[in-house]
Image (cartoon, helix red, strand yellow):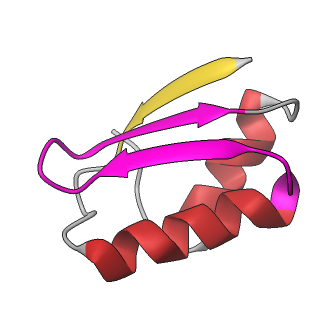
Amino acid sequence: MKLQFSVPTMACGACVKTITNAVKSVDQTAQIEADPKTKQVAVETDSSEAAVKEAIEGAGYAIA
């Protein structure tokens, strides 16, 4: 399923890497596109939306 999140605290490439690693910890095959300029994260995953949100928030990023 395709998920879209707004992550206002994502600011740079390091943030993108941290968020990518967090999502991959839930679903290794997930495809993640994160843009620190627009603060948008798109995830193509087989995991639940709740699991992906929890992973991103667990990495220290609030979802708007």
Q: How many marks?
A: 0
Residue ID at (57%, 74%): 59
State which quadrant residue 36 falls in: bottom left
Specify the quadrant that holds the C terminus.
Answer: top left
Question: What is the quadrant of the N terminus in the image?
Answer: top right
Of residues 59 and 33, the one drawn nearer to the viewer in this rendering:
33
Tell me what residue is drawn at x 12 percent, y 51 percent: 37
Q: Is residue 27 magenta?
A: yes
Classify residue 22 by image quadrant: bottom right
Q: Residue at x 38, y 49 (%)?
A: 34
* Position in image of residue 47 (x %, y %): 86, 35
Q: Position of residue 15 (x, y in %)?
A: 36, 74
Q: Report the residue that reaches farthest toward the left.
A: 37
Q: In this orientation, does residue 60 appear?
A: no
Quick check: 4 above or below 37? Answer: above
Q: Is residue 35 visible from the viewing direction of this image? A: yes
Counting from the top left corner in percent of width and height, residue 29 is at 84, 48
**Magenta span covers which residues?**
26-44
Q: Is residue 60 magenta?
A: no
Q: Residue 51 at what x, y percent from top left? A: 79, 44
- Residue for point 66% across, 42% down: 31
Q: Nearer the viewer, residue 57 or 41?
A: 41
Q: Residue furthest top?
A: 1
Q: Horizontally, is 38 left or right of 51 in the view?
A: left
